[in-house]
Amino acid sequence: MRRGGRWPMVPGDEDGRATAMDEAPAADDEEAGDERRQLLAGFGRGFGGALIFSLPMLMTMEMWWLGFSIDRARLVLLLLLNVPLLTFLSHYSGFEQTFEWWEDLRDAMIAYAIGILTGCVVLGVFGVLAPGMPLEELVGKVAIQAIPASIGALLGRSQLGGGSKPAHSATEATYRSELFLMAGGAVFLGLNVAPTEEMILISYQMNPWQGIGLMALSMAIMHGFVYAVSFKGGSERGPDTPWWSVFLRFTVVGYALAGLISAYLLWTFGRMDGLGPGQVVMAMAVLGFPASVGAAAARLIL
C-alpha cells in the first residue's frame, strides 16, 4: 500500500538500495578510468613508435629538401596510398581491437594525426620548420615525414608493449594478407633509404654481375630470414609442402613486390628521372635489398 505518495520500504531495503546505488557509479568510474588509462597508454605507444621508427628520416637532409622540391602530385599520391596500408596494418597492429573496417580506418587516421604532430614537433625543434617559411614548404616537409611516422605509430602498439590482437592474429592471415604484410614491410624500410643520394651512387658503382649477385643475395636472405631460420612469427614450411612451393609463392613473389615498390618509391622521389633503362634496373636492385629485408621481417614486426 502507498503512503504519502511513496511505496513502503522493506526493512533494510533502503540501506541496501543506497549501497548498490553508491557501488554502481564507483564501478562505472573505475571502468571509465581504466579505459582512459588504456587509451592514453595506446597514444603514448603510438607517439613513441612514431618517433623511434621515423627518427632516421626526421634527421635526414634529403627528406627536408624533398619537402618542398618533390612533385606535389606524386606526394599526394603517396599520401593517399598510405591510407589503405595504414588501414590494413591497423587490422593487425592498431591501437585497440577492432571488428569493422571503419574502426581500422579510424585508427589509420589517428596514426596519421600522430605522425603529423610528431613531424611538426621534431622538425620545429630541429629548426627545419621556421616562421616565415612558405605554407607550401611547411606542409610538404611535414607531410612527407608523416608517412613513416604514421606507420611507426601503428607499429608502436606491438613493439612497445601493447600486446597483440587475438581477433586478427597474423598467423591466421590469408595468402593475400601475407603479401600485403610483405608490401607494408617493404614500403616502411624502403622509405628510410629511397630519398637518399646513396641509392643512385651505389647503383653507379656496381657492374651488372654485381647487380645480379645483389638480387640473388636479397632473395636468399628473404627466404632464409622467414622460412629457414624460423624466427618467432616466421612461416614454417609444413611437412607436406615442398620447399620450391614456398620459395615460389612467398620468396619470389615477395621479392617481385619489393622490386615494384622500390620502383614506385624511386619514381616518387624523382630518383629515376633522366636514368636509362639499365640504370633504372640497377637502382631498383639496390633499393630492393632493404625493401626485401623489410618484406621478410614484416611478420616479425607485426
Image: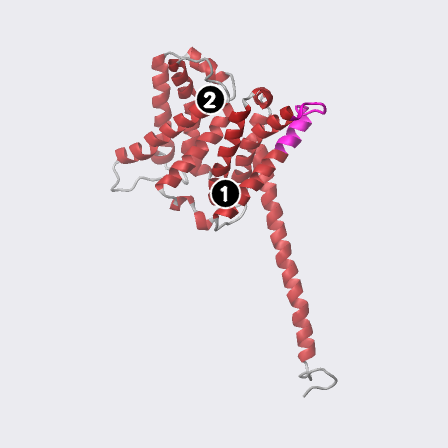
Inspect the magenta stretch and tell me whether residue 265 lies in it. no
Q: How many numbered marks appear? A: 2
Inspect the magenta stretch and tell me whether residue 120 lies in it. yes
Q: Residue 69's x, y, as percent? A: 57, 19
Report the span colored magenta: 118-135
Q: Residue beneath label 2, please?
A: 267
How does the figure colour the protein chain or chains? secondary structure
Q: In terms of image quadrants, where is residue 60?
A: top right
Describe residue 50's horizontal placement relative to residue 15 as left or right: left
Residue drawn at x 37%, y 35% as measured from the top left: 226
Callout 1: SS: helix
Residue drawn at x 46%, y 22% as measured from the top left: 267
Amino acid, disc 2:
Trp
Q: Residue 266's x, y, as percent? A: 46, 22
Residue drawn at x 26%, y 33% as measured from the top left: 244
Quadrant location of the N terminus in the rendered image: bottom right
Front residue of this view, candidates 224 and 282: 282
Q: Residue 75's x, y, as percent? A: 53, 27
